[in-house]
Amino acid sequence: MKKVMLKTTLSLAVAMASSQLFASGFALNEQSISGMGTGYAGRSSSADDASTVAGNPAGMSRLKRDQITGGVAAIDAKTDIKHANGGPPGSTNDGDMVPFTKVPMLFAVKKATDDLAFGLGVYAPFGLITNYEDSFGGRYYGKKSDVKVITFQPTVSYAFNQYVSVGFGPTINKISGQLTSATPLAQTFGRNDGQVNIKGDDTAWGYKVGILVTPTDKTNIGLTYTSKVKYKLDGHTNISGAGFGPFNGGRYGASLDITTPESVDFSITQKLDDQWTVYAGSTWTRWSRLKDITVNNSGVPAQLGGAAGPIGTISEPQNWHDTWASAIGASFQVNKQWVLRTGFSVDQAPTNNTDRSVRIPTGDRKAVSFGAGFNATDDLTIDAALSYLWEEEVNVNRTGKGNAYNAEYKNSAWGYALGATYKF
């Protein structure tokens, strides 16, 4: 009994942590509509609008006017599951567990002087929503994952001269998550599946700092550092419908300490002539911080060992690795009103073949992007972008909980974005 409960609770506890981190694997890069058009190749070196608050805060001092930039990106993901084995009789493997998802963003920049600027950004750096069908074959390893991260970033930027600008902003990060999984304990006694439901949240501080160098009037070189953020998620674990012996479920306090990794983004923007501009950039993320996940539960009943029992403190190795994401892009200024953009990017997944889960069955990916900007007036610019992302085929191999589950996953997604910048 304890062994089965341990594996069920541990799997969800690990998923609660890793889902937030794996948001990077699903790359919520959607913090700039203009940047999306070039595949975010010039994330740190292009200060095209107020979204530079998130891309490189040093770019705020390069903007000529006060402005507000807002928009929304939408993600339409698809998953094909093949060669699935495992799960109880009657299990299904429909895939397409990611619903149509919207990601909003809003930025504002106020110029205090020609060299000093203040800004504020509200955006989503991480996020994950997956929801399998109730009869999914791997439901004992993950059913629903809904994790949201919202960042508020007040920012300041200063230009020392026409060549060097710097920027800094503390980040206030709000995380909330809900994860559910079926438990096979009830089925052992000829009943329906039970359910484990975990909820938790936390607010933590970090920071973002950047430098922007312009050695010539046609070249921008940018470097942005985003700090690690230490979280302590507090919440509860609900177990219902377990249906064996004297134990039918319960509610327990749960806490989880975890640190999201730091990242460094470097990019170059090169203006070739009055029409053509090219971009290139890379981002390094220190995912190797995540060696294991440890969860502390409180209020565990004596028959399950209490706080010192097998589900009082539980841990599981992850052994993630550092990743690189790289992109190239270009823009073409058609005329005063229109600019066209395109980009191509590649992104490594931090996971390994041993520990990959059904909650985040992701692999290395590639993406192609297209975008356009339209100057409706001297004060109003409208930006739109379209991207297509595809991942390598990966294997998920899970054992335990009385039902092993193995399958091949192939993920892809369309991204759509629309935004506007108003200058005043």
Image: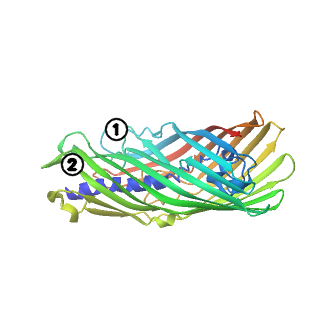
Residue to which mark 1 is pinned? 135
Classify 10 Å Cα crowding around label 1: few (below 14), some (14-19), many (20 and above).
Answer: some
Whether residue 367 appears in this view of the structure is: yes
Which marked residue is nearer to the observer: mark 1 or mark 2? Answer: 2
Q: In which quarter of the image is the N terminus?
A: bottom left
Q: In which quarter of the image is the C terminus?
A: top right
- On screen, residue 281 versus residue 321, left or right, reads right
Image coords of residue 277 (percent x, y): 80, 50
N-terminal label among 1 and 2: 1
Q: Which of the pair 62/344 is nearer the observer?
A: 62
Whether residue 126 appears in this view of the structure is: no
Label 1 element class: loop
Q: Which of the pair 2/239 is nearer the observer?
A: 239
- On screen, residue 210 versus residue 159, left or right, reads left
Marks 1/2 in contact by CB < 8 Å: the verdict is no
Looking at the image, which residue sits at the far left? 246
Amino acid beneath label 1: Ser
Q: Residue 3 carries which label?
A: none
Total numbered labels placed on residues in the image: 2
Image coords of residue 352 (percent x, y): 48, 60
Image coords of residue 35 (percent x, y): 68, 47
Amino acid beneath label 2: Gly
Q: Which of the pair 299/132 is nearer the observer?
A: 299
Residue to which mark 2 is pinned? 250
Task: Please tell me whether residue 21 is drawn above or below residue 197 in the rendered image.
Answer: below
Residue 17's quadrant in the figure?
bottom left
Q: How is colour applied across the structure in the image? A: rainbow
Label 2 element class: strand
Image coords of residue 350 (percent x, y): 52, 59
- On screen, residue 37 versus residue 185, left or right, reads right
Distance (Cα) linking label 1 and label 2: 24 Å
